[in-house]
Amino acid sequence: MLKNTLNTKQRCYLRSLGMTEDPVINIGKEGITPSLVLGANDVITKRELVKVNVLQNCPLEVKEAITLLAERSDCDLVQIIGRKGLLFRRNFKKPKITFPNSKKRSHR
């Protein structure tokens, strides 16, 4: 089952960080293999936020491939745009991404 532990503001912040990222994981003609999932787990543990690219020759649909990778690597799916997706999993031992404080302003 797909994780959904992020609220809207956190998702928005991660999308803004993901705009400057280059795709690190490519899903190709073999689809989602165990070796791809192991490699994705290592990369996601180190970086926390990873951009995924689904190549044209992938046998799965784009949304299906990215969702399946997110489920198998126990990540949050932040967004899917075109053939690219953004995955996030917090690293509690060595966190790299800190979310900004969402302090509410009082209107006077």
Image (spheres, helix red, strand yellow):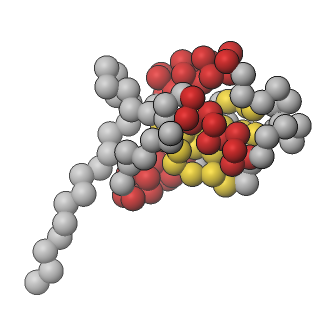
Say if residue 22 shows up in the picture. no
- Give the x, y percent position of residue 29: 86, 30
Picture quadrant where residue 82 is located: bottom right
Say if residue 41 shows up in the picture. yes
- Give the x, y percent position of residue 50: 56, 35
Relative placement, left or right, of 93 versus 85 is left
Picture quadrant where residue 64 is located: top right
- Residue shown at the point (47%, 23%) measured from the top left: 45
- Residue shown at the point (24%, 52%) measured from the top left: 101
Viewport quadrant of the C terminus:
bottom left
- Give the x, y percent position of residue 106: 13, 74
- Residue shown at the point (67%, 18%) measured from the top left: 34
Relative placement, left or right, of 13 versus 22 is left
- Give the x, y percent position of residue 61: 77, 46
Picture quadrant where residue 70 is located: top right
**In the image, farthest residue toward the front:** 1
Q: Nearer the viewer, residue 100 or 88?
A: 88
